[in-house]
Image (cartoon, rainbow, N blue to C red):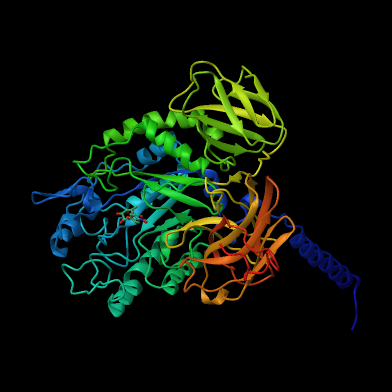
Amino acid sequence: MKFSYASLLISFLLIIFFSDCRNQSERVPEKNISEQEPDGPDLDWFREAKFGMFIHWGPYSCLAGEYNGRQVPVSQNAEWIMKNLTIPVNEYREIARKMNPVRFDADELVRLAKETGMKYIVITAKHHDGFAMYDSKVSDYNIVKWGSFGRDPLKELSEACARHGIKFCFYYSHREDWDHPGGYGNNWDYDNDWGSDLYNKAAFNKYLEEKAKPQLRELLTNYGPVGLVWFDRGMYTPEQGKEFVRLVHDLQPATLINGRVGHYDQELPGDYQSMADNGMPPGGLREYWETPMTLNRTWGFSKFDTLWKSPETVITRLVEIVSRGGNFLLNIGPTGDGEIPEATKRIFSEVGPWVSRNAESIYGTTANPFGELPWGYCTVKGNRLYLHVRDWPSDGKIKLQGLKNQANSAYLLKDQSERLSFTCNEEQIVIQVPSVAPDKPLSVVVLELNGAPVVAPREVFQDENGSLMLDYLTVKTTGKAVTRFNRKGGFHISKWNGPDDIAEWMIKINKPGIFKVNITYAANKEWDGEKYEIAAGNQVIRQSVVHTGDWYDYQEFPAGYLEFTEAGVIRLTIRPADQSTTNLMYLKSIRLDPVKETKRYGWSSSNTESLLSD
Ligand code: JFZ
């Protein structure tokens, strides 16, 4: 085989080229994080956003709370008119056919959201009435094909959101469907026995497979990136709930899912917890959550519902929710022809400017670390505390207890030219503020610290009987232990599975003595026998979990005894004793009750068979 110089040169160049390509491919600059598609649910934008617009809009908006002279009472939701007035499917379908929302303007909606400070929009793609407010290929029962409108509002809205940098999201009623014979909830047209566990499984599964799932697929395929899917009213079985989670994440892995995708009887299968409508959890939750709220009393438009919330109420609710670590999803109900009610625009026109001038104290902040504050709310960002003062002090003094690090400066967010004076001592910091509140309904005072706030754990005091109640309101959790909420389990501490996952309290003993320790928790069978330790000073109570039936069936158990011989503040902890794959328990509370001292021999805190009588 003859090798010409040319062939050698070509070979050499090819080697360089391919090695260079290979190197080239290795040298391809990594996308920076922000451009990388998250490979899982993207909570970051949600945590940053804080404030969203909910839109309830469908054929029920055309009825506006009344049909054939019958009215949906203002205390009931106007979007439930089909069920509340048992409107036959065939009649409702004709109401839907007449829907022709020529006044719908996606840009106007998105501009209103943006000017009000809302960063995401969740619109009803299909509510319980089964009517699709988008161009569905699955069913002609939709806004584009069924009547004369011929436009796709969700397409127009998703494009307007993209133009204005607002996250496009949609609501989908995946269980309730009063139009489809297999959907849950229509027991006036269809002979479905809809007792809680007697639903018509075959018909329901047919509805899921021929309507709910295919419609979700087309929504997650044809409308661009979807920030979140807002499911509603749960699902029958945990497995069905998980099927919807898989469906969403198979199509858009970054799309968030709210807490109502799964059955209320199961652990949260979504990415964040949906609180009850207009619900307000106490603070201290470490799991993320969102509260939806109506602007009057109904989600869908009602011409009778004039009980509008004031701008002050909306602003205060926003701050209250954000200060407790959640998101606020505020609803608007456009009219049947697509108009935004004047009252909505008036309220939003006052909310927006307040949010804009106080934006720094809202977006990207974390929850108040101090517990309830008598004068208002607190949010945190880096080394800054944002004190949202609701009750402006007549003596000009804002007091804050529990801060352990040094304050460097204080000023009004609205006027940063003037520094406020303040004094600090062991107990508290007192900020001197002007006599007149600079803003309303809340004025923001900024306290700059020498670092991220360090807050003394809140102390738990003995009550008049000398007892102590330790629960999620005063707990400090570390590791994977979290304070959380779900509809079935209520507020509790869980998600812990090793000795580094700790719940602790600082208990203030004024009346020393021996205390009986009772623990209230729920545990399913898989957690039976897991070991936990309750420790205070050099005392340790070691116990085993006894299953209570299910993870939300709470029961009280005697855990043992602790003795405190002197007054003082003591750190009490509870944690899994060993590393485990289970969640140990849903802890509701630990209670310490003083016991009479009778016999004192052979007693040990780890011995639950104490010789002491209570
Ligand atoms: C549901 C819908 O039925 C209603 O029409 C609206 O869409 C609302 C946002 O969601 O209503 C609920 C669902 C759950 C609770 C309350 C109202 N809940 O958990 O308290």
Point out the quarter of the image occupied by ligand 1: bottom left
Across and down, in percent, residue 271 comes to 51, 59
Dividing the image into 4 quarters, which one contains the C terminus? Answer: bottom right
Asked where in the image residue 2 lies, by quadrant, the reply is bottom right
Question: What residue do we see at 80% from left, 64% from top?
Answer: 17
Apparent side of residue 472 relative to residue 153 in the rendered image (left or right): right
Relative vertical location of residue 445 with respect to residue 467 in this rendering, above or below: above
Pick the front one: 135 or 466: 466
Is residue 472 shown to the viewer in this render?
Answer: yes
Residue ranking furthest to the front = 598
Pick the front one: 156 or 608: 608
Residue ranking furthest to the left = 69
Across and down, in percent, residue 504 comes to 64, 53
Relative vertical location of residue 318 with respect to residue 555 in this rendering, above or below: above
Pick the front one: 116 or 386: 386
Asked where in the image residue 608 lies, by quadrant, the reply is bottom right
Question: What residue do we see at 31% from left, 49% from top?
Answer: 56
Dividing the image into 4 quarters, which one contains the N terminus? Answer: bottom right
Is residue 149 shown to the viewer in this render?
Answer: no
Pick the front one: 614 or 103: 614
Across and down, in percent, residue 567 comes to 68, 45
Question: What residue do we see at 66% from left, 35% from top?
Answer: 403
Asked where in the image residue 583 lies, by quadrant, the reply is bottom right
Question: What number of labels is visible?
Answer: 0
Across and down, in percent, residue 386 comes to 57, 32
Relative vertical location of residue 183 with respect to residue 501 in this rendering, above or below: below
Question: What residue do we see at 23% from left, 64% from top?
Answer: 178
